[in-house]
């Protein structure tokens, strides 16, 4: 551990390495062929062996290195000894070469809350829609999402479908011989890395929304945006990546299904490149350790022109979704 680095940058560097290991675990569970699926609250709210193993890996790895952190994971798992093979104690050295934004340089471990979604897009994972899946590690300070890491275990999956899949050694490479998987990271005030920032062409309005958790409010809100196209995909992390890579203009989810561990990491990365994520009323989300986990007033996120979409949210939707 290099004493010259700030707590925040050491945590992000560790979270990057931990997220990469998580991606390996996610792919390994698929390769073994037994997903170990259990229903949590309903048929669309699932948990797999990958959810369980990845959460144990992330939470235990970070807690060992940063024992004063508050870590909140999606899965409600019984306490048990964690297999040493799940522990990742590395840190991504490239991140440690970056300067810590001055406003975060004096942060202590105990000031930070880490929100973990071990497998965002679990339903899609069980259905073989593997490019929807992400691993999310979000870092909050004083209730605000300030840093995040997103691993896409199956980035380049479409390129690799008919070829022998290769585990990544470093960064993913584009093209038909690309390595499977990538890790994106960002810190507010520093920027976001691991992808190519793109915007939807001016004048085009492409909405990304839920694939598995739609209802009349979601349908009404999306329609009110007068979209040129609507993408229905799994995973909050996946949808934010669509925004920052120019595949969608706005992520619209007018429903209370999304949780803090779904949005903390993606929000950090979106905000680091000048985007905006709020609830459907335009209110900032809060990430204190004592906050309720549900984003009960939905999610509205954009890379640009947030006000354009916020103004189009129907009053009936606003009335139905109470913050």
Image (cartoon, rainbow, N blue to C red):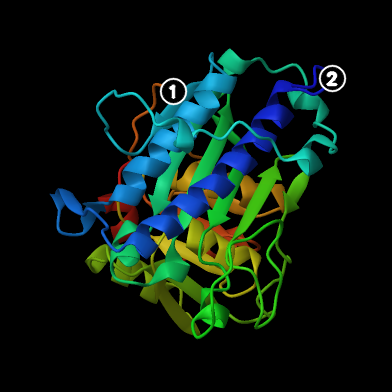
Residue at the spot 52% in from the left edge and 29% down from the top edge: 61
Q: Quadrant of the C terminus?
A: top left
The answer to which of 95 and 201 lies nearer the viewer is: 95
In this image, 229 relative to 179: left or right? Answer: left
The answer to which of 3 and 223 lies nearer the viewer is: 3
Image quadrant of residue 124?
A: bottom left
In this image, 22 relative to 123: left or right? Answer: right
Residue 121 higher or lower than 50, as above or below: below
Q: Earlier in the sequence, mark 1 or mark 2?
A: 2
CA gap, disc 1 to disc 2? 28 Å
Residue 298 at least partly seen: yes
Image quadrant of residue 224?
A: bottom left
Residue at the spot 70% in from the left edge and 40% down from the top edge: 187
Mark seen at residue 4: 2
Coordinates of residue 47 in the picture (x, y in percent):
26, 49
Coordinates of residue 71 in the picture (x, y in percent):
46, 26
In this image, 107 relative to 265: left or right? Answer: right
Q: What secondary structure is marked by label 1?
A: loop
The answer to which of 87 and 44 lies nearer the viewer is: 87
The answer to which of 104 and 82 lies nearer the viewer is: 82
Coordinates of residue 197 in the picture (x, y in percent):
73, 65
Residue at the spot 63% in from the left edge and 54% down from the top edge: 183
Residue position for label 1: 289
Q: Total marks drawn?
A: 2
Coordinates of residue 146 in the picture (x, y in percent):
63, 36
Residue 294 higher or lower than 49, as above or below: above
Q: What secondary structure is marked by label 2?
A: loop
Mark seen at residue 175: none
Residue 136 higher or lower than 182, as above or below: above
């Amino acid at each position: 551990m290099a004493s010259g680095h700030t707590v925040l940058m050491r945590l992000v560097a560790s979270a990057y390495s931990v997220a990469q290991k998580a991606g390996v675990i996610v792919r390994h569970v698929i390769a073994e062929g037994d997903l170990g699926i259990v229903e949590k609250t309903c048929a669309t709210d699932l948990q797999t062996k990958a959810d369980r193993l990845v959460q144990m890996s992330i939470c235990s790895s970070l807690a060992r290195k940063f024992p004063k952190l508050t870590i909140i994971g999606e899965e409600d798992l019984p306490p048990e000894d964690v297999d040493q093979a799940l522990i990742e104690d590395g840190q991504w050295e490239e991140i440690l070469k970056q300067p810590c934004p001055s406003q975060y340089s004096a942060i202590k471990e105990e000031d930070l809350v880490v929100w973990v979604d071990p497998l965002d897009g679990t339903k899609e994972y069980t259905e073989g829609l593997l490019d929807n899946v992400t691993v999310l590690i979000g870092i909050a300070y004083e209730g605000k999402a300030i840093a995040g890491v997103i691993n896409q275990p199956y980035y380049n999956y479409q390129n690799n479908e008919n070829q022998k899949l290769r585990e990544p050694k470093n960064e993913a490479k584009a093209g038909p011989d690309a390595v499977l998987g990538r890790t994106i990271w960002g810190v507010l005030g520093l920027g976001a890395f691991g992808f190519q920032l793109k915007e939807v062409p001016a004048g085009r309005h492409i909405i990304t929304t839920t694939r598995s958790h739609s209802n009349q409010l979601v349908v009404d809100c999306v329609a009110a945006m007068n979209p040129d196209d609507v993408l229905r995909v799994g995973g909050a992390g996946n949808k934010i990546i669509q925004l920052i890579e120019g595949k969608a203009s706005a992520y619209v989810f007018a429903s209370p299904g999304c949780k803090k561990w779904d949005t903390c990491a993606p929000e950090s990365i979106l905000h680091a490149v000048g985007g905006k994520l709020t609830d459907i009323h335009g209110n900032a989300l809060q990430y204190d350790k004592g906050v309720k986990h549900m984003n009960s007033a939905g999610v509205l996120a954009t890379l640009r022109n947030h006000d354009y979409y916020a103004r189009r949210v129907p009053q009936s939707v606003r009335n139905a979704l109470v913050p």
